[in-house]
Amino acid sequence: KILIIGACGQIGTELTTKLREIYGVNNVIASDINTRNLELVNSGPFEIIDAKNFNAIKDCCKNHNIDTIYLMAALLSATGEKYPMEAWDLNMNSLFHVLNLAKGGAIKKIFWPSSIAVFGPTTPRENTPQHTTCEPTTVYGITKQVGERWCEYYHNKYGVDVRSIRYPGIISHKAMPGGGTTDYAVEIYHDAVKTKTYNCFLSENTQLPMMFMEDAIKATIDIMTVKKDAVKIRSSYNVAAISFTPKEVAASIKQHISDFEISYKPDYRQAIADSWPKSINDDSARKDWNWKHSFSLEAITKEMLFQLNKKYNNPAKK
Ligand code: VAH
């Protein structure tokens, strides 16, 4: 059976739904530190678990006969800069807990998300390679870089089958992201539908790698279902879809909402975005496990505006 830690988060919410479609509701235990997403909590087996609590995770795995864990709990880049020690504590200790459960043989397979945040200002920013300089300047990026090293170590030393991908910014309409620098790319669609205006916290030409949630979920499921020896990189794979700037996504929205207006007021998150790549090379993922994305910026904008119009303009038919 599968345990998802951090199931109420932006990715966890949709990952839970997808995994339940594939494996059956009762074979996927969702867990989070609280019950903030009641729809998810009431949609199948749910446990309150603090990802920093080893015994809580261990007991849940024993009680539910868990053999696979998706560890989706973390403090992201913007929040991590406000609470550095909490970000280190949660992001690192939750990883050690699941790696040690697997080392002990209780868990057969782990998914752990890394991020383009492992790259820093000294990394080549265009078409960033799989293997390159990683000097992250955010606490979140440091936890992801070090986490990658620990995943590779536990695989090589103890045979732990842990698999990982470096997510770019992820765009979705079901659950809001929490405390990320790429969150503007989600907020802009909500505000476009609600008020036809958006005040962007990044400057107009800030290009970042982005991916629609359906592509991100596909990449996650794909890397977790390929046979073991296809996963040649045990730190974490680059995966790419598209890259765009706030100006470009605003133009894409304007094709549907012609009077949409964007303004720019860069804040502390601008420095984080400026330290990250503009585009990612994912040849290794495409070669090793046939990764390929589907959603273009136009397709994302069309789907986001359609779904958010339904959500905000016909609340009855949720
Ligand atoms: C963040 N959405 O902004 C996350 C992600 C690459 C960005 O790691 O922190």
Image: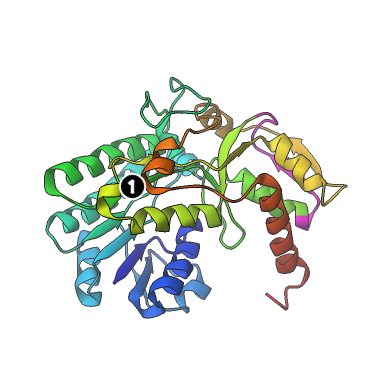
Q: Position of residue 261 (x, y in %)?
A: 82, 42
**Kind of residue at disc 1:** Asn
Residue lying at 70% horizontally and 55% vertically, measured from the top left: 190
Report whether residue 120 is seen.
yes
Question: Left or right of 219: which side holds 71?
Answer: left
Q: Residue furthest top?
A: 122
Residue lying at 18% horizontally and 58% vertically, measured from the top left: 101
Residue 39's place in the image compared with 185, above or below, is below
- Is 24 one of the magenta-colored residues? no
Relative depth, front residue between 222 and 60: 222
Task: Quadrant for the N terminus, please.
Answer: bottom left
Residue 72's place in the image compared with 311, above or below, is above
- Is 203 one of the magenta-colored residues? yes
Relative depth, front residue between 30 and 279: 279
Task: Quadrant for the C terminus, please.
Answer: bottom right
Element type at mark 1: helix
Task: Give the extent of the magenta segment.
Answer: 193-205
Q: Mark 1: is the Cβ under 8 angstroms from ligand 1?
A: no
Question: Left or right of 121: which side holds 267?
Answer: right
Relative depth, front residue between 45 and 287: 287
Q: Position of residue 92 (x, y in %)?
A: 28, 45
Q: Position of residue 142 (x, y in %)?
A: 35, 34
Residue lying at 69% horizontally and 39% vertically, measured from the top left: 200
Residue lying at 41% horizontally and 78% vertically, measured from the top left: 25
Query: Which residue is denoted by mark 1 in the rendering?
Result: 91
How crowded is the residue under tag 1: few (<14 C-alpha within 10 Å), some, or many (20+)? many
Report whether residue 177 is seen.
no
Q: Position of residue 134 (x, y in %)?
A: 37, 27
